[in-house]
Image (spheres, rainbow, N blue to C red):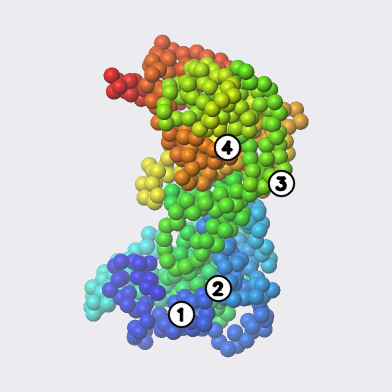
Amino acid sequence: PNIAPNIAPNIAPNIGLLHSGFTLNPSQSLPLPITPTMSDALVGRSLEWAENTPELESEHKKINNNITRTRFPPEPNGYLHIGHAKSMNMNFSLAFSKLGVPEDNQRTIFRYDDTNPEAESKEYIDSLAKDVKWLGWEPERTTFSSDNFSTLEELAEKLIKKGSAYVCFMKPAEVEAQREICKKRIAAKAKGKDPDVEVKNADGLYPGKWRDASVEDNLKRWNRMKKGFYAEGECTLRMKMDLSSPNPNMHDLMAYRIKYFPHPHAGKGRCVYPSYDYTHCICDSLERIDYSICTLEFETRREPYFWLLAQLDMYRPKVYEMSRLNIEYTVLSKRRLLKLVKGTVRGWDDPRMPTISGLRRRGYTKECLNAFCDDVGATRNANLVEVTRLQQHARVALADKARRAMAVLRPVKVVCSGAAKSTLTVPDYPQSPELGSHTVEFTPTFYVDSRDVRTEHDPNFFGFAPGNLVGIKYANTKVIVDSVGAGGVMCHVVDEGKPKSYVTWVGEGGIKCEVREYGNLFTVPEPSADWESEINPDSEIICPDAMVDPSVGELCDKSKVNKWTSNVSFQFERIGYYVVDDDTTWSFKDGKGKIVFNSVVGLKEDKAKGAGKGDDKKGGGSKSGDLQRAKQAAAKARLEIPLTELFMKDPEWAGLYSKYDADGIPTHDKEGTELKKNQVKKLKKEYEKHKKALAKKK
C-alpha cells in the first residue's frame, strides 16, 4: 500500500524507498519488503523484521495451538466512542470471519493500554469495562499494560546492554530540531548531495552527544532514572534506531520518560513510565497475539513495532491497519471530545456525544451499534459515513421493540363539546396486536401538539384549524373546529363526514414530562480545524411542558433507570422514537418526580402524508415533513399576532409566563420566578425577529 501521505512532505523525494522494488545501501537499516502471502485475509505491508524465526514460530504455535488471538487495547483516558465500537466489532468478530477461524478457536484480549497516568483515571477504567460488557463482547481475559511494568523495565535494560537504547538529556525542543535535521539530510541525500555539506548541524544535535555513550554509562543513568535522581523532563530513555531512515518513526523514539505521578491501576512507587511505541508491541508479543489490528495512521509505525521485537528476539504478531471510522456531523478526536465535555455538553454521556455512553443514553441499543459496525465493515479505504445509516439501524432495532404511546411535545388545550369520557384499548405494537395492549382515557378536554394547530383555515392543512373536520385517533370521534385562539381550541363532536387526518392526543390525566429533542452536534458534515465555531447552537431543544399518556408511568419509574444499560424506549406515535433519560426522578407509586425523554430518531421518511395533510388511521408519516409544515404554518399564523402580544398568544409561548415588560417581553415564568438574563436575551431575539417579520409584511 502507498503510505506516502503519512510521511512528512519534505522527505517525499526519498519515499520510493518504502515501496516494493527499492534498493538500499548497506548502511541503511530499513528492511527490504517481502511479498505478502495472499492466503491471509488480513495482510499489511510486509517487512523483513516482521519475519519470525522457525524457533519463535514453533514456540508460538505450541502455546496457542489452534487458537487465533486478537486484542482490543484502548487507553483509559476518556470514554469509548463509536470508533471504538468499530474496533471491538473487528477484534471480537469480523476479523475472525475474514480469516475463517472457527468460533471455538476465537480469542480476544481486552487490554487497558495504560501508560500515561496523568491522563487516565479509575472513572475511565470502570467505564471502558462497562461499555465492552454492554455491547455484548466477552474477552478471553482483561489485562493492563501496567501489569507488565516490571517486565518492560527488564527488557529496556536488555536493549541498553545490546547498545540499542540510551539515556538522552536533550530537551523536547532539541529533539524536535534533531528530527528536522534528519529530514533535511534524507532529502539532500535523495537529491544526490552530501548531507554533511548541505545540512547545518546546529549545536551538534545530529546524531547527538548522548547517542554513543557506553553501555555502562547508560545502565548507570537508567538506574538513576528509575530511582528518581532526575527531574521530570530532564532525560528520557530513547531507542537507538536509524536516524537515516526515510520513516520519521525510526528516528530514535522515546521508550521511557520520567513522571512523578501515581498510576491509577499500578499505584505509587514508580517514576518512569513507558511510551506507547515501546509498550504495545511488547505486550502484543507477551500476550501471544496473532493479529494486532489498528487504524491506518499507525501504518508507518510498522517499522518501530517490528524493529523493537526483532531487537528483543520476541515473537512478532501480524499487523493489519484499517481505516478509521468517520461519521458526518461528528468529531472522534479525544482532545476535541474532552474540550466538548469541559464546555459544551452535559458530560461524556451527553446524548449528543458519539461516545458509547452518549449513544446509549440517546437510545441507541447494542443491537443497533453492532449492526451498524457490521454494515460499515473494515477496509483500508478512508470514507465519511452518512449519519443516516446509523439512524436507520436505530429505526430497525427499535421498530419491533419500542412500545407505542401518544405524546404531545408542545401541548395545546382542546375543549370538545359533546364528547364523553371513555376508556380506550390501544395496542402496544399495532403490527403485532397479540403482544399486548394498554388503556388510555379520552376526556372532553384533551391536549394536542402545537404542530397540529393553526389559527387560520388553510385548504392544505387538515389538523385543528377553524372549520376543519378532524378525527381523534383511537377515540372513534370526529370533531369540527369552532375556533383557535390563545386559550386553545374549541370544537364539537359530529357524526357525519370523513376526516382527512386522525390526530394523536393526550387526555387530561396525562403525565407532564420533559422532552429533549436532539439534532446534529455540528452544522457541517465534516467539522474543520475551526470546529468550535461549527457547533450547532440548536443541537438540544428542550420541551419542558410535554405530556405523555399515563400508561407509560410504571415503565418509566426511576427504579428502572440505569445509565449502564439501555433504558426503556417508546415510539411516540406520529413523532418518533424516544428513550427514558437518566435524569428521570419519576416515582410511579406516589406520582411525584419528573420523567425525562430523549429523542432517538424520527420515524422513517416515506411518501405518506404528514401531520398537516392527513395521517391515516394507523398514524405514521414523515417527522421531518411534519415539522417543516408545522414551522411554515406557525410562521404564517405568527404574522397575525401584534408585537406586544407575541409571547401571550403564540402557541409556542402562550401560558408559559406570568409577567411581561412594557414591550410584552416576559420577565417571570408561570410560577412567578424571575427569568434569568440568558433566558430574557433569547426571548428578545425572538421579539426582534417578529418585529422584522411584521415590518416586512407591511
Indicate which disc, 1 or 3, sits on the residue closer to the N terminus. 1
Q: Give the quarter of the image for residue 372.
A: bottom right
Name the residue: 36% across, 50% down.
529
Q: Which residue is mark 1?
A: 46
Q: Give the quarter of the image for residue 553.
A: top right
The nearer-to-camera label among 2 and 3 is 3
Q: Which residue is mark 4?
A: 617
The amino acid type, in three-letter code, at marker 3 is Leu
Q: CA distance from mark 4 to mark 3?
A: 20 Å
Q: CA distance from mark 1 to mark 4?
A: 63 Å
Viewport quadrant of the C terminus: top left
Q: Which residue is mark 2?
A: 98
Q: CA distance from mark 2 to mark 3?
A: 39 Å
Contact flag, marks 4 and 2 (Cβ < 8 Å): no
Q: Position of residue 350 (x, y in %)?
A: 55, 43
The nearer-to-camera label among 2 and 1 is 2
The nearer-to-camera label among 4 and 3 is 4
Q: CA distance from mark 1 to mark 3?
A: 56 Å
Q: Which residue is mark 3?
A: 435
Task: Identify which residue, 466 or 223, lies in the foreground.
Answer: 466
| Badge 2: residue crowd in 10 Å (few <14, some 14–19, many ≥20) | few
Circle 3: element type = helix
Contact flag, marks 2 and 3 (Cβ < 8 Å): no
| Badge 1: residue crowd in 10 Å (few <14, some 14–19, many ≥20) | many
Circle 4: element type = loop
Contact flag, marks 1 and 4 (Cβ < 8 Å): no
